[in-house]
Structure formats: C-alpha cells, structure tokens
Image (tube, rainbow, N blue to C red):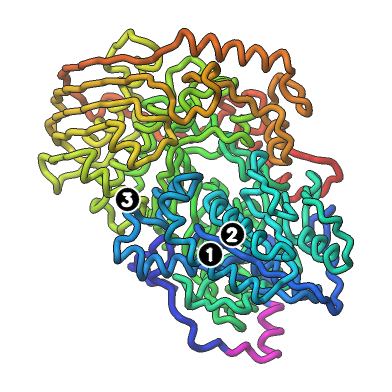
Amino acid sequence: MPKKSEHLDFNLLNISKTVEEIPDAPELSVEDARHQQMMDKIAPYAKKVRQKNMTDIDLVTRTRESSVMLVMCPEWAPEFPPFSLARLSGICKQAGYECEIMDLNVKTHNIYRNDWQPNEKIPFRLWDPSASWHWLGETYMHDIHPLLEPILTEAIDYIIEKNPTLVGFSEYYISEEPSKWMVRELKRRAPHIKTAVGGPNVHKDWFNNIPEYDFVVVGEGERAILRILEQLETFQWDGEQQVLRQDAMERIDINDMPMPDYTGLDFNDYRVPNGVTSEFSRGCTAKCTFCEETHFWKYRQRQAVDVIREAEWLYYNKGTDIMWFIDSLVNGNVNELRAFSLGLRAKQIPMRWTGYARCDGRMDEEYFKDISGDGGCIMLNFGCESGSQKVLNDMAKGVTIKETEDNFDMCKKYNVAAATNWIVGFPTEEHDDFAKTMLFLWRNRNKNINNVGAGVGMAVGPETIVGQNPDKYNVGWHKYQNHWIRKDFTMGGTHVMHRVKLFHMFLDFMTGYTEQPFGYPVRFNLRAEHYGVEFSNPDKFYEVEYEDFDYNIIKLEENPFANTLVNEIWPFLRVLWLARGGYKIEIAFNPEIDLKEFGSQFGPGMFTGKYKFFITDSGVWSAQFEYDFQQIDNPYDERSEEDKGAFYAQDYSRMQSNAAKRARKLAKPDWDLDAGRSDHDFGRLITQQTEYNSSIDFSFTHTYRGTGKWSRTSHTVDVPDEITSGVNSDNIHLTNKTEFYRAQDLISAINVEDDHEFD
C-alpha cells in the first residue's frame, strides 16, 4: 500500500509496474480458512441472495465453426486493457467460439507517445480531455486521420488474413469516426466478413448508423453477441441489417460470468501493466438531472463475493493488484462495497481499487476505516459537480456541501485520494453559484484532491431529465447559435464559455498552493495567449469561507443576454482575490484564440472582450472592461437559406431510446410520455423560431470603467448542510437526506416485477 506521505496521481502511474512474477496461491487449507473468515466479516453488509428478476446469459459450450474479432479504435483510455471486450471474449470462448481482441487504441497511443508527439506531428495533446473535440466529424478527418490511416489499414490487412466470421467494434463518441472509416474500408475489401457495432455511442437515439454495420447492438452486449454468432453459425441471418435493441425491462445478471479473457493482449503495452478495469454494478441509483448515463440501463449490483472471486483470480493468475471499477457509481450500494473491502482484508488479497462515487453522508469515519488501507481503496472519483447547494439541489444530487467536505476530510485522514469532477454552467447556476464552486475547491485543496475534472461546461443532453423537460430548468425550446440558451435569454454559450475558461484559469492559480500536486486538463494556450497576471505577493494566500455575494455589479440595460454577460468576469476576479490577495491581470477573449482552444462547442466566434483589473491586498480595485458581441450568420447552420438563423427549434420529446424514455418518465413533462410533443405544439416552436430569427439580435458593445472596495468577511455564510428539492419540487425523496437514502437503497435492492423507479 502507498505510504501516508506518497502522492497518488490520478492515472495511477506512480504505482504502476511491470508484472514479472505471478504470486503463488495459498494452500487449500489456508484458502478455506480465509474464505470462512471472509464470509464472517462481510456477513453484516453483503447480500445473502442475488437481486431477483435478473436475466441470465445462456452459455452452452459446444464446438463452433464461427470466430469473432473484437476491435477497439482510438481514442479511449490507454491505461488499462479494454474490460468490456475482455468480458465479451470470455463469454464467446466459453460458448465455443474463437475470439481475438485487437486494441488499436493502445497501439496508436504508444505510437503517438513515441513518434507523433516528440516529433511534433500533431500540434495538440491528442489523448488529453481538452482535445477530445479533434476526434469529431470533419475535424478528425483533417487533424488526425492522415496519420492514423496507415495504422487502420494495417489492421484491416490483418483482419482479412485471419478471416473471422464477425468483426465487432466497441464504439465511444470519440472513436466513432475511426470506427466508421475502418468498417467501410473492411466492407469494401472483404464484403463477406460480417460487422457489428455496440458500445455507449450506439445507445444514443441519434447514433449515426451506416449500412456497412450488419448488426447494431443497442444495450448490453453479452446476450446480443451470442445471438448474432448463433445466427451466423446456423446460417439463419437474412443478410439485412439487424438492430438488436435490449428490452427496457431487461437487466442482465452480472454475477458469475466467465472471467474476462485478455489472451493476446500484452499488459506491458498499457500505462498501468499491473491494473485492469472491472465493474461492481451497472446503472445508477441516483437520477441526477444533467446525466444521460444514469438512464442507459436499470441498476443491478454484483455481490461482494463475486467481485472478490474475480479480484483473487486476477491477482493469482495475472499478477494484477489494481482494479479500476468503471461503474457509473461504485458506491450505489454502500454496504456491498464495504463488504468487498472487508473481504479483501480477510482473504489477504493486496488488491488496490478505485471507482466513480457519490459523496455520501453515510460514508462516515468508520466506513473509511473499513475501505481504506488493507481494504484496498486508494482513490474515489467523486462527482462533485458544484460547490453551490442550490445547484446541487437542482441537479438532484441529494448531498450537502458539508457532507462532501466531511468525505474529503476522511479521504485525507485515511489516505484515500479524492479525484473530482465538475460541471460549470448548469442552467440554473448564477454568478454567485459559480463563485461557490471555486471557493469549494480552494477550501478543500489540501484534502487529498489529486485531480480536477474541469469539463467543458454543461451540455443539455437529449437523454437527460433537463433535456426531456427543459422548461423546468429555464432552458429554451430553441438553441441559439448551436448552443442551448435560457428561456429568458440570460445565459447561453458565450456565458458558459466564460465560466469554462475562467475555471481553468483558476486551476492554474491553484497550482503550487496545495500540499500535494493535482492533475487537471491544463490548457497551456491560456497562459500563452489568453491572460497575463502579476500578484502583489506570490507567496501569500488566504483561507476562505463561503459567502453570498451580489455579482450584478455592472448595471447594463441593453438586452437580457448582454446584461448578464457583462458580469461573467466578476466571480473569478473576486474569488482569486479572496484566495491569493492583491494582483493585476489582463484577460482576452476573441474568436481567434477561443475557437482555437475550445472549438465551436459554444457557438461560432462572436465575442471580443478585454478585461483589465487591479486590486490591492486590502480590496481596493479598479476595472477597465471592453465588450463587443456581434451576432453573426452561423457558419455551422446547415439548413436551407430561408430557414437559416441564430435560433432553431430543438425537440427531444419523441426520442424512443430506452435512456430517453426513462429520463422522460422522471422529468414529468407536460406532453405524452410515449408520443411526445404534438404536431401542433411542434408547429408552434417552428413559428416561434421564425419570429426569433427575424426579431432578435443580441449584438452590443460596451465600455466599463469602475472602482470599488471589497471586504473579506461581510458576506460569509455557514457551510450548507440541508438539501431541498430545488426546482424538482415534485420529487418527495429530495426533501431531506433520509428520504433520499431510502430511495437509493430501494433501487439498489430492487426485487419487484414492474418498472420501478422512485419519482
């Protein structure tokens, strides 16, 4: 286990090692004794029986003629071998099919590290989250494909030589373009080889299906791949593209599956050779309003004893001593997770583990004692999202700021690294709410935080609760310049871009002021082109309190969009002063540098801003700001000339994916849950779209000169420790923490026949 003083980096690279010797398994008598001790230790927390109403995988082993090759195209995480493909390979092999995994993602990543990056063949960090937009659409074909094509072509040559019956692609949104190119080329050169695609990207209602995919798997893959292979084995496929959609009620039992099969993969190709990914559950017990992933499939839990069985097998057969659980929520059942840790202790399996987690008030000091140390937990990847209790309530997070800080306190005390994830620009987030997020990070910067997932701002996903009932969250029915906008026009893409950029800048200024270094998606161009700063005393810093502060400092009466945009800068300026004292700073916004850094995800480049600000340590400040926002013809608008405009109607009410239907049920919109918005209602949206495009132009210019004096203590408030339902007023379970935990426990232990979800 890492020593108390050691820093654990987010990617686990400083505990990675090559596996040179496989540990010896204990004698049978010792193993029996440890097993009994494990069962005694986990008894108070582990379920004695499985959840009911699970669907088993029918695995009949027989001699087969068909074979399958599973392919992972870039880009995805290169730290570990692909668990999802290894799981499918194990199932296929147990059923009697030959199977091979081709991980083009790790192959390309290693070429990138050894050639493309050092020889500057690509002018951006290809595997960094900040560069993910380069993998999308035409940008991919221009920026990446010319270098990647020879690798994909070589892989196709190998596939044709091996001549499998079926080639299956696991597709994420940032691997869609390479996957499509490869399958098209494979079909052109070897049309007799059948192709299939599955994975998270395929679940989307708007998945870009192409005819070259013979089989499209929407949902979990274990049963689907066996159905496909059985059809091909027995010559029952009719030659037409087949879309295999998982029934909305189906939940595959993820206990007692065959061990994942990593045959043919060299663990030393990966950045953490002694580690693997795995799963503790599927689905999510929470229903956060911004999240699409929580609606992919219904929640179910692996029993602790089954996960321990896998951990033990990996340790004594592969030398693996790190498991990264890729669940949406590893602590969806806090008791079963605790039982897993206690079982590792009892069986003396030195397995270290991490996973994505919710901050949870039930994870008290005794809980952290059990899961840390010999319990194996080295890091929890928390979905914090916001430092504002109001925003957390609107997100339906069901946790308080105090509980989150308490969890961080325990992380530090018991040496569990705290990775964090954040969403800035939630539709109900005001300027003061954004400030509270930065205040939270500064307050807790020395509580074992090893990573800040800064994200790229809130996107209204179609398969989210917000997307299925935007009216409740003040989101308009029309997009403005390719980005969502509030109904009252007080927040849009340019506002969100401000917060994303300023949030990344704040992390730059947090660097060097923490007891342990932390990772985040560093945007080096910001320092080079976007800002310059000089602190009065670089060695000086302050501890901060939460506060309620009115950031409506510039009283502009131009239009709703402009009136709030002019005040976007203030939360960053004030929190930076609260944390670091006096400084002078210049910050630039303009289309050239902002489109180069962020792409067009916030809309086309329309804003130019120059911010000059000076503040003394005592709080006396002066500001010189220049604003120029010009609403332009949107170059990304592909509609006909007569329909083009800044606004276009966006309606997700008729989407029929399982995820969209689940989100719609919980969102409780006014329209029919199955049929969606009526034709008449949608016609009104089109009419309103025309009206907006003919009458609304948010263009403005403004110059601000101002001075003032700030105080450090006049606006402080207590750390929030109560939850409310926020804008989700019809959700009773969000009125207090006890009801929220009851609802979570109900879902994690669900045994009912109907489609039960808490409302």
The residue sitting at 66% across, 74% down in the picture is 100
Q: CA distance from mark 2 to mark 1?
A: 6 Å
- Residue 42 sits in which quadrant? bottom right
Give the number of the mark in front: 1 or 3.
1
Residue at the limit of the structure toward the front, as seen here: 189
In the foreground, 720 or 159: 159
Left or right placement of residue 118 versus residue 108 in this view: left
* Residue 530 screen position, x and y as percent: 24, 38
Residue at 74% across, 38% down: 757
Tell me how far mark 2 sits from mark 3, CA to CA: 32 Å
Residue 85 higher or lower than 513, as above or below: below
* Disc 2 secondary structure class: helix
Asked if marks 1 and 3 touch (Cβ < 8 Å), the reply is no
Q: Is 35 included in the stretch rendered in magenta?
A: yes
Main secondary structure type of the part rendered in magenta: helix
Q: Who comes first in sequence, dot 1 or dot 3?
A: 1
Q: Which residue is mark 3?
A: 522
Residues shaded magenta = 24-36
Q: Residue at label 1? A: 152
Left/right of residue 419 with respect to residue 61 in the rendered view: left
The N terminus - image quarter? bottom left
Residue 281 colored magenta?
A: no
Q: Helix or strand or loop: what does disc 3 sit on?
A: loop
The amino acid beneath tag 1 is: Leu
Q: Residues within 10 Å of mark 3 (few under 14, many from 20)?
A: some
Amino acid marked by disc 3: Val
